[in-house]
Image: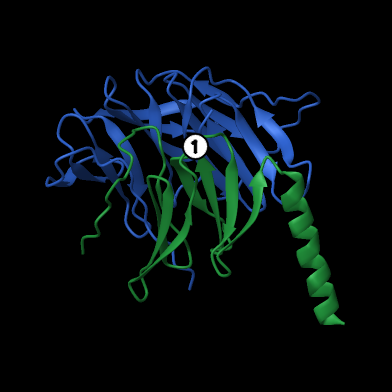
Chain colours: A blue, B green
Amino acid sequence: MRVTSLAWNHHLLTTGGKDAKVINNDVRIREHIVESYEGHRQEVCGLKWSASGQQLASGGNDNLLFIWDRFMASSNSPRHWLHKLEDHTAAVKALAWCPFQSNLLASGGGGNDRHIKFWNTQTGTCLNSVDTDSQVCALQWNKHERELLSSHGFTENQLILWKYPSMVKMAELSGHTSPVLFMTQVLIMN
Amino acid sequence: MTLDAPDIVDDFYLNLLDWGINNVLAIALGTTVYLWNASNSSISEVVTVDEEDGPVTSISWAPDGRHLAVGLDNSNVQLWDSETNQMVCTLPFVLEVIYFFFSCDIICLIISY
């Protein structure tokens, strides 16, 4: 059961994989499994903690997007979700928390979905949904401007820079000849 | 700038690229994890896992910019120290690694005396 997604929150390493489980591991202690989040039915391929470390977004091949609250009171394990979001119609891998607005998450759907959706993760409300005409593989917010970069697979394998919140296309970058599966950006601490 | 990524696993579900706050880009190509230091363009290898354990299916820098989590096809996660290029532990924890962990602490203790 391969481990396909990892996300850090201080000393917690959250893992998600083919077994559909999302597990918080405290890497400092021997009994490292401290919490588990159960809700996915298929492989977990997207996993991102919010900047505050309070909310975790997880996306899966079951087309589901969950929002989990780190501090939600729970007497029983595993923990219950804050929101179960079922609007995507393909695997949810691309996840990105907005750096300038708390509780705002962007999510992207796979080949049969092709939409970028925006969520208020406090209320679970879908704020906007944009059809990109291509599989959404990864999303990155611009840390300096109100812009979002998306990378795509079938059919166009392109990158698109969007103005937020208008979602006007600022640029569309073609050149890759196969899906742009992964994106990352550096966050240098000054 | 363009960097070659030979043997990168073409699988939508994996997460094989992460840029740490140390300005070092980590990438998994098949069974090997490489680091590219963006400050001086140097390349180093962290680990090549055994064929039966791989390929590497996910990587993620810890917030300290020093430790790198490496998820594997065999369901394990390895935690690597990029400064010493040594494995700190695996999840699930195994006995031998716990001992290694303890022995490191003891060595540090002796040095500090």
Residue B40 placement, left or right of A1: left
Asked if residue A108 lies left or right of residue B96, the reply is left
Please name the residue shown 47% across and 40% down the image. B54
Residue A164 position, x and y percent, is 30, 44
Against B8, is B33 above or below?
Answer: below
Res A86 seen here: yes
Residue drawn 26% across and 26% down?
A: A114
Q: Nearer the viewer, residue B63 or B29?
A: B29
Task: Read off the chain for label 1.
Answer: B
Image position, residue B74 (x, y; %) = 54, 34
**Between A45 and A164, which is closer to the camera in this rendering?**
A45
Residue found at x 33% / y 48% = A183
Q: Secondary structure at mark 1?
A: loop
Q: Residue furthest front?
A: B51
Residue A103 vertical position relative to residue A20 in the rendered view, above or below: below
In the picture of the structure, the residue carrying the numbered disc 1 is: B52
Q: Is residue A8 above or below residue B40?
A: above
Q: Quadrant of residue B25?
A: bottom left
Q: Is residue B20 above or below residue B31?
A: below
Residue A45: x %, y % from top left: 45, 32
Tell which residue pokes out farthest to the right in this image: B113
Residue A50 visible to an observer of this rendering: no
Q: Position of residue B40 (x, y in %)?
A: 35, 76
| Quadrant containing the C terminus of chain B in the rendered view | bottom right
Residue at the left extreme, as displayed: A175
Is B59 situated left or right of B37 in this image?
right
Q: Answer with left or right where residue A27 lies relative to residue A166.
A: right
Kind of residue indicated by mark 1: Glu
Q: Residues within 10 Å of mark 1 (few under 14, many from 20)?
A: few
Q: Nearer the viewer, residue B54 or A30?
A: B54
Q: Residue at x 60, y 41 (%)?
A: A14
